[in-house]
Image (cartoon, rainbow, N blue to C red):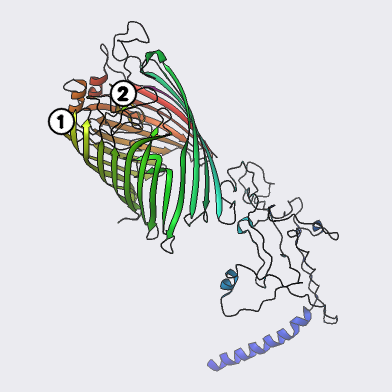
C-alpha cells in the first residue's frame, strides 16, 4: 500500500509539470493596462481634500485636465503630475526605459512589515534636483463637516507607502447603500454634513481636530424651558395687608405658576485622542442665561414687602462653568492616569446626590487605577453664593469650605456592582444673609435667629449596579460634628445623625419594577444639646421618583422649609442653596414602590407611590408650639413621561403630575381654621433641546 501511494505522488508530479509547460503559452496574451474605474452614471465625483491654510489649491495643467481621467482628482497643488505608467511590452518589443524611482530605500527584511510601516514619522526628503512623486490614489471627500485641516503637509515617500498627513480627514467614496438616491428621510452611512447638523460628524462637535492631529473643540448648546403649576400651603399676612379684604385664615390660596428659561452654551477645548485615552489638558467655559417668573395668589410670597404684589420676574446671567484640567501622569499601559482640575466645575459626590451635588469653585485631584476598575477623587470647594431665583452661581464669596474624598471600586465581589467609600467635611461659618428677594436665609429665621458656625464630618458607604438580574442602589451615611448655636435648639449642639437608603429593581422586558426606602434620623429632644437629625450639605437627590411632589417642591413652614426642592430631607432649613445645614429636625421615613414602562423606544412612563412618615415629632412640636403631632405625613402619587423623538438627548420632552394626599401629621401643621388642608397637586412640562 505504501509503495502504491509513493508511485501515485510521482505520477501526479509529472502531470503537473506537463500542464505548467503548456498553460503559460496559452495565456501569454498581453495584459490590459490598469486604469481607474469610472464612477457609475449619476454618482457624485470624487473631490480633493478639504481646503487648508497650509494646502494650496490644486493647479490645472495645460495638458490633460483632471476631469479627463474618470474618478481621478489631481493631487495637492505644488506637486507635479505623476508620469504615466508605461504599458507592458510583448517579448518582441524593446522594453521601455525604466522610470527613475524617487527616494529609493533599501529593503528591510529584519523586521515585521507592520513595524517598518509604523516607524518612519518623518519621511526622507527628496535629494536635490529630484522630483517628488505624488500620491497615486484618488482623494475622496471627508465625511460629515470636517472643516479645514490644521496639519502642515510634508513631502516625501518611500517604497512602503504614500504619506497622508491628516489621518482624521481621510475621505471615503460615496456609497448608495439602498440604491434609492440618498433621500433625506433615510439614515444613510458615508454622508457629508453641514456645520449646523448635529447628527453627522463635525469639527465643532469634537469629531475632527481643530488644531493639528490631537487638539479638539466641542460646542454644546442647551436650552431648557420649564412651565409648572403647583399648590403650596401659603400663609397670608392678616396683620399687614391681604390680597383679598377680610381674610382671617392663616393659610390662604395655594396656587402658584412658575416659568423658567435657561440657555447654556458650552465651549470645550481639549487635547487627546477623543476616545479611550484620557485628555492631556482641557479648558471649558459655560456661560448661563436665565429668565424666570413666579405668579402667586397671596402677598408676601414673592417678597416680604407686600407692596411688591403677587408677580415676580427676574433674569440672571453668569459664567457657570470655567475650569482648566491637566493630566499629571499616565501610571499604567491601560491608560490609568492622575489629573487635576481647577475652577468652577460640576461634581456629585455619590451615585444619588445625597450629600453634595453642585457646580462651584474648587480644585480636584482625580484619577483611576487597575485598568479603570478603581477611581478616586480628592476635592476642595470654596463656595460661591447662589442667585436666589435662577439657582446659578454669583461671583460673591460665601466663605463656606467643603472637602471631599471618595474612592470607587468596580466589579466589587459581584461583576457589575460598584461600591464607594467617602468622606465629606463641611465648614459653614456664621453669617447674616438676606436673599435677592429680601428673605433671611442665614441664620435660619427660627428660634433665636443667631449667626452660628456648622462643622460637620460625614462618613459614607454607597453602592450601585446589579447582582445577577437584580439592580441595587444603596447608601449609608453617619455625620458627626458641632453647631455653635442651633436656632431651634437655642444652644450649641453636638451632631450625631445617620441616613440610609436602599433601592431594588428588576427588569422584565419593557418594564422595570422598583421598591425602595429612605431613612433620615430625627431629633427626639430639641433641647438636650444633642442634634440627631440628619441633613446634607448641598444635596440634589435622584431618589423616590423624579416627579414626586415631596421631592420637587419646597413646602414652607414659618420662614423655613419643612422640605426643600430637589431634596427628600425634612430638615426645617431656610433654603437648600443658601441656607445652612440644620441637624435639629424631625427626620423622615420614605417607603416607595414604582414601575417604569418603555411604551416605545422613544416614550417612557415613570410612576411612583411614596408613603411618608416623620421619624420624630418633638422638634415640630417645639417649633410650632403644638403638641401631639402625628408622624404620618401622607401619600405621594406621581406619574410622568419622558419622550425622546430622535432616540438621543438632542430633544427631550418631560411632563408629570403629582399629588400629595395629606396625612394626620401634615394636616396638624397646615389645616385652615374651618377646613382641612386639601390634596396638593402639581403639574409641569419641560422641554430640553441640545446641539
Distance from the alpha carbon under mark 2 to that under mark 1: 22 Å
Magenta highlight: main SS: loop
The stretch in magenta equals: 228-247
**Which quadrant is the C terminus positioned in?**
top right
Q: Residue furthest bottom?
A: 3
Q: Residue at x 54, y 46 (%)?
A: 218
User: Based on the displayed image, in which of its 4 quarters is residue 629 positioned?
Assistant: top left
Q: Is residue 221 left or right of residue 346?
A: right
**Left or right: 322 in relation to 9:** left
In-image side of 20 versus 213 (left or right):
right
Q: Is residue 160 magenta?
A: no
Q: Marks 1 and 2: in contact by CB < 8 Å? A: no
Instruction: Indicate the position of residue 622 as horizontal and vertical percent values.
Output: 18, 24
Q: Secondary structure at mark 2?
A: strand
The location of residue 18, given as percent across then percent down, is: 71, 87
Query: Which class describes the residues within 10 Å of circle 1: few (<14), some (14-19), or many (20+)?
Result: some
Residue 298 visible to an observer of this rendering: no
Residue topped by disc 1: 525
Which residue occupies the extreme top position in the image? 246
Vertical placement of residue 338 versus 527, above or below: below
**Residue 230 belongs to magenta span:** yes
Mark 2 packing: few (<14 Cα in 10 Å), some, or many (20+)?
some
Above or below: residue 145 compared with residue 303: below
- Tell me if residue 373 comes above or below residue 501 in the rendering: below
Picture quadrant of residue 136: bottom right
Would you name the residue on which mark 2 appears? 556
Amino acid at each position: 500500500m505504501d509503495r502504491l501511494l509513493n508511485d501515485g505522488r510521482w505520477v501526479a508530479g509529472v502531470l503537473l509539470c506537463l500542464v505548467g509547460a503548456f498553460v503559460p503559452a496559452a495565456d501569454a496574451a498581453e495584459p490590459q493596462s490598469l486604469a481607474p474605474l469610472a464612477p457609475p452614471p449619476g454618482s457624485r465625483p470624487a473631490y480633493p481634500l478639504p481646503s487648508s491654510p497650509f494646502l494650496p489649491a490644486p493647479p490645472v495643467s495645460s495638458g490633460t485636465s483632471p476631469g479627463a481621467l474618470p474618478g481621478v482628482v489631481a493631487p495637492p497643488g505644488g506637486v507635479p503630475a505623476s508620469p504615466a505608467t508605461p504599458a507592458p511590452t510583448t517579448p518582441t518589443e524593446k522594453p521601455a526605459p525604466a522610470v527613475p524611482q524617487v527616494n529609493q530605500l533599501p529593503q528591510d527584511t529584519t523586521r515585521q512589515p507592520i513595524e517598518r510601516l509604523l516607524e518612519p514619522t518623518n519621511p526622507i526628503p527628496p535629494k536635490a534636483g529630484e522630483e517628488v512623486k505624488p500620491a497615486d490614489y484618488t482623494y475622496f471627500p471627508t465625511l460629515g463637516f470636517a472643516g479645514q485641516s490644521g496639519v502642515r503637509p510634508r513631502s516625501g515617500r518611500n517604497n512602503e507607502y504614500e504619506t497622508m498627513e491628516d489621518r482624521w480627514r481621510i475621505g471615503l467614496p460615496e456609497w448608495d447603500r439602498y440604491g434609492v438616491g440618498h433621500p433625506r428621510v433615510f439614515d444613510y452611512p458615508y454622508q457629508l454634513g453641514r456645520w449646523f447638523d448635529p447628527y453627522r460628524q463635525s469639527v465643532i462637535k469634537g469629531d475632527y481636530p481643530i488644531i493639528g492631529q490631537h487638539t479638539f473643540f466641542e460646542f454644546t448648546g442647551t436650552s431648557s424651558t420649564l412651565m409648572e403649576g403647583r399648590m403650596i400651603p401659603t400663609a397670608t399676612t392678616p396683620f399687614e395687608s391681604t390680597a383679598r379684604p377680610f381674610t382671617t385664615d392663616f393659610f390662604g390660596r395655594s396656587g402658584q405658576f412658575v416659568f423658567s428659561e435657561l440657555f447654556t452654551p458650552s465651549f470645550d477645548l481639549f487635547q487627546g485622542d477623543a476616545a479611550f485615552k484620557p485628555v492631556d489638558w482641557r479648558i471649558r467655559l459655560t456661560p448661563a442665561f436665565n429668565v424666570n417668573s413666579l405668579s402667586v395668589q397671596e402677598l408676601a410670597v414673592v417678597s416680604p414687602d407686600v407692596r411688591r404684589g403677587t408677580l415676580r420676574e427676574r433674569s440672571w446671567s453668569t459664567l457657570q462653568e470655567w475650569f482648566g484640567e491637566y493630566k499629571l501622569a499616565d501610571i499604567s499601559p491601560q491608560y490609568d492616569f492622575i489629573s487635576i482640575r481647577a475652577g468652577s466645575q460640576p461634581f456629585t459626590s455619590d451615585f444619588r446626590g445625597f450629600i453634595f451635588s453642585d457646580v462651584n469653585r474648587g480644585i480636584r485631584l482625580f484619577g483611576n487605577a487597575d485598568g479603570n476598575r478603581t477611581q478616586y477623587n480628592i476635592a476642595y470647594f470654596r463656595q460661591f453664593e447662589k442667585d436666589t431665583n435662577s439657582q446659578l452661581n454669583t461671583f460673591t464669596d460665601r466663605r463656606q469650605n467643603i472637602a471631599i474624598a471618595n474612592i470607587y471600586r468596580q466589579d466589587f465581589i459581584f461583576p457589575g456592582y460598584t461600591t464607594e467609600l467617602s468622606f465629606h467635611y463641611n465648614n459653614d461659618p456664621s453669617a447674616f444673609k438676606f436673599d435677592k428677594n429680601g428673605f433671611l436665609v442665614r441664620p435660619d429665621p427660627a428660634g433665636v435667629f443667631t449667626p452660628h458656625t456648622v462643622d460637620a464630618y460625614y462618613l459614607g458607604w454607597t453602592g450601585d449596579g446589579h447582582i445577577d438580574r437584580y439592580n441595587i442602589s444603596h447608601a449609608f451615611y453617619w455625620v458627626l460634628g458641632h453647631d455653635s448655636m442651633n436656632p431651634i435648639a437655642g444652644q450649641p449642639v453636638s451632631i450625631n445623625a445617620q441616613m440610609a437608603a436602599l433601592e431594588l429593581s428588576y427588569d422584565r422586558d419593557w418594564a422595570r419594577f422598583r421598591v425602595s426606602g429612605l431613612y433620615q434620623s430625627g431629633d427626639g429632644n430639641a433641647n438636650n444639646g444633642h442634634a440627631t437629625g440628619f441633613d446634607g450639605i448641598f444635596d440634589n437627590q435622584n431618589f423616590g421618583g423624579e416627579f414626586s411632589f415631596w421631592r420637587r417642591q419646597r413646602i414652607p413652614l414659618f420662614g423655613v422649609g419643612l422640605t426643600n426642592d430637589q431634596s427628600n430631607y425634612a430638615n426645617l432649613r431656610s433654603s437648600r442653596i443658601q441656607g445652612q445645614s440644620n441637624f435639629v429636625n424631625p427626620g423622615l421615613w420614605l417607603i416607595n414602590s414604582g414601575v417604569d414602562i418603555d411604551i416605545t423606544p422613544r416614550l417612557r412612563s415613570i410612576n411612583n407611590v411614596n408613603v411618608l412618615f416623620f421619624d420624630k415629632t418633638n422638634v415640630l412640636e417645639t417649633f410650632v408650639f403644638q403638641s401631639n403631632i402625628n408622624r404620618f405625613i401622607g401619600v405621594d402619587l406621581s406619574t410622568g413621561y419622558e419622550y425622546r423623538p430622535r432616540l438621543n438627548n438632542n430633544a427631550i420632552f418631560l411632563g408629570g403630575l403629582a399629588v400629595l394626599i395629606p396625612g394626620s401629621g401634615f394636616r396638624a401643621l397646615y389645616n385652615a381654621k374651618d377646613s382641612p388642608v386639601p390634596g396638593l397637586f402639581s403639574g409641569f412640562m419641560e422641554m430640553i433641546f441640545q446641539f
